[in-house]
Image: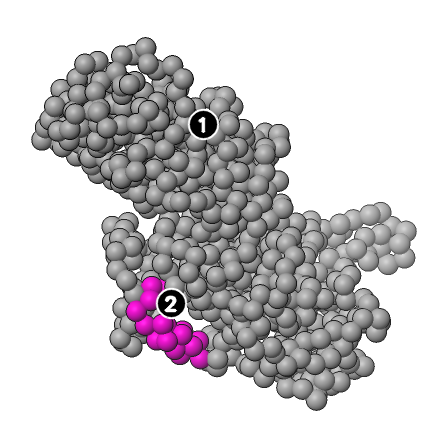
Amino acid sequence: MPALPVHGTAGREWNGHALRSLDADTRRRLVRDDRPYHHVMADQLPGAEPAPAADLAGLERAQPPAGADLRPRPLDPAEHGRAGPGAAGRLYRHHHPATRARQQRGLVLRLLGMSAAPLLRQVFGFDAFRPGQEEIVDAVAAGRDVLAIMPTGGGKSLCYQLPALMRDGLTVVISPLIALMRDQVRALTEAGVAAAALTSGNSDEENSEVLRALNARELRLLYMAPERLASGATIPMLRRAGVQAIAVDEAHCVSQWGHDFRPDYLRVGELRRTLSVPLAAFTATADAETREEIVKRLFDGAQPQSFLRGFDRPNIHLAFQPKDGPRRQILDFAAARRGQSGIVYCGTRAKTETLAGALNEAGLAAVAYHGGMEPDQRRKVEARFQREDGLIVVATVAFGMGIDKPDIRWVAHADLPKSIEAYYQEIGRGGRDGAPAETLTLYGPDDIRLRRGQIDEGLAPPERKAADHARLNALLGLAEATACRRVALLRYFGEEAAACGNCDICDNPPECFDATEAAQKVLSAVLRTGQTYGAGHVIDVLTGTMTDRIRQRGHDRLPTFGVGRDMAKPQWQAVIRQMLGRDLIRPDPERHGGLAITAAAHPVLRGEERITLRRDAMTRARPAVVVRTQVDEEDAPLLSALKAKRRALAEAARVPAYVIFPDRTLIEMAQSRPRTLDEMARVNGVGAKKLESYGEEFLRVIAGEVAPMHPARRALAGRASGDLFDRLAEAQARLMRGEDGTEKPLSVSNSALRRIAEDRPRDLARYLDAARLDRFGAAFAAEIAADPEG
């Protein structure tokens, strides 16, 4: 009978048994090797007797014997003289008293030639792949370049971990967060896979152990953050370690204008080219534009084998509610799910702390998490959330991408997410185990202002800002949907689906009405006011509300003034919000967020298409709490644009933003909207030096192109002497060739005009020579005498 092949003559016993009971199939799948794979060691199987090396021929894929114990045994630091397992990952050295000496010299047994399915059961304990996994695993294991778009919770990590066990050599995994790497390394090492991570969170001792294992070629998977690729020593290190493949987790982070952009992800393409090895990229969040950028950045434009496994998470219940006492809404939602782990996402750090406190006061265990916390504090929250059942984490978007907790039962948004992609990714952290999970997203006018401001204050080019506004409009459309939310969500990602029966609209279909006439009134008001005003001004026109701005612009004389008095302002707000979601109107970034109609609105305006809106949303559109904002809704887009300019100037000068202008100055600019340097100079906080340094920059944001102004005149900007300077300059131009226009040309320098305007002299002889005094003296004196400040 063929015997079990064992390296050398040691290892004749397994758990004290003679090696006689293994069948031929089991013997054929085992082979000697000095490097760890999935470690099936000499103390883990019942055995037979040693075999000659000649019996290695004809190895076939086979399952291990039923009942075999394949759990690894970790290295004992006391016996081997090295540090024990830490954050870098346990490097397992399996041992048995009878074979320990040889194992210290690197003797391990390795499973060879096993296909994916047996390894799936053997290593990870799964009897079957999840839908879509097996084809991806086969493509990655075959050494092809792969781009896989899989839903959150769809098992992305297994699609690169399993192929790493099916090939020789090392697989490098680029991952964005230390917490994510720690979780995966911990899970792999517990499964007996030689995996480790090189992170900034490692101790020197841990990093030394990882480097030793790399040099010894003992690892199958090495995790590292993309930032480590910036080090010149990293690529030579990976070359020496025998890297055979690269896996990129959260590949959407390579998208320069995406919501999770990490600049060092751009180095991954260079790593692939340098090592000349296949690359597999994985993400759950990538629309068509992001997928194109991934292909460009990671695969040099060469099309990889792509897998789009769908975005549907049918186990997640989708729900939205207009804000109506948002704290109470969140508390009620959480209380109804007491004892279940959940996440509440908030738009600001301060809100995470106040809302976590409110939940605790209500008897619900909750903890805040945001990027302003110390790293140790954040790690404690992460560990506690992983460890405790029923804990609620109230967090900003800083939380989640590195959390691999399968039994999160609900995800709530206390504020509207920044985009539909962010929404999809964040709700996807619930129900990763496939069991039912619930979501609730609250939204209101304050959210829209916040998200618009974040887009407009960013440094992206105008076309990118327009695209981000469109993404936000899509999310607003999802919030105001009149039919199945899942259909709307999946349609955004390019998928068609039938009504799901697992969203709030399918549960309770909303009351809708024909809103064509209301929409036409809005579109008409937008057009007649020049497509330059926000929702607040348009609603004032519709409801016939007389304001200073309407009176100054003459908009009370428009045919649309007062045509919407049949509905209250909150109802018009809901109509406009729903029209934004339908992309019938859109903020124009070139006009500081003024509403403009889109091509899709023309058929509605002409009566060729009907539009249906939700009536229930109109009755709940009013925010239940007073939202304190820096400026009125009408001025918020311009304030955002001014802040963006301030941020750019501050970064260029490497000074705090308030050194350029404080908020109160920008607020006054947004409210008063100066159109000249004179008007700008009258804004509180704009002194002469700042007017000279920054006045034109900010005026361009507000008014577009700025007429050039001589420095002598600019020195008088905003002062009465500036007006006098202008009148003196006009008189000089009129008399340059005398009263009859036939005399020799004469002029007065701008600096002299400035002195005259400032001093308003009774005697001009000290400022003008005889010829100029004769030509201009009387006219100048008349202007000085007529000056009200004289």
In the image, the segment drawn in magenta is: 325-344
Instruction: Identify whether 166 is placed above or below 602.
Output: above
Q: Nearer the viewer, mark 2 or mark 1?
A: 1
Quadrant in which the C terminus appears: bottom right
Residue 273 picture location, percent across and down = 51, 23
Give the distance between the C-alpha atoms of the residues marked 2 and 1, in whole angstroms: 43 Å
**Furthest residue toward left:** 78
Q: Amino acid at mark 1?
A: Ala
Q: Residue furthest top?
A: 54
> 790 or 142: nearer the eye?
142
Res 216 visible: no
Q: Which mark is residue 301?
A: none
Q: Is residue 343 magenta?
A: yes
The colour mode here is: one colour
Give the residue pinned by disc 1. Answer: 245
* Of pointers 2 and 1, the one earlier in the residue sequence: 1
- How far across and how far down the image is residue 500, in percent? 58, 65
**Local SS, label 1:** strand
Q: Residues within 10 Å of mark 2 (few under 14, many from 20)?
A: some
The residue at the point 68 percent across, 66 percent down is 582
Left or right: 689, with 539 as reference point: left
Under circle 2, the secondary element is helix
The reply, left or right, for residue 526 in relation to residue 689 is right
- Residue 597 placement: quadrant: bottom right
* Callout 1 crowding tier (Cα within 10 Å): few <14, some 14–19, many ≥20: many
Q: Which residue is mark 2?
A: 351
Camera sees residue 347: yes
Q: Residue at x 49, y 24 (%)?
A: 277
Give the residue furthest to the front: 1
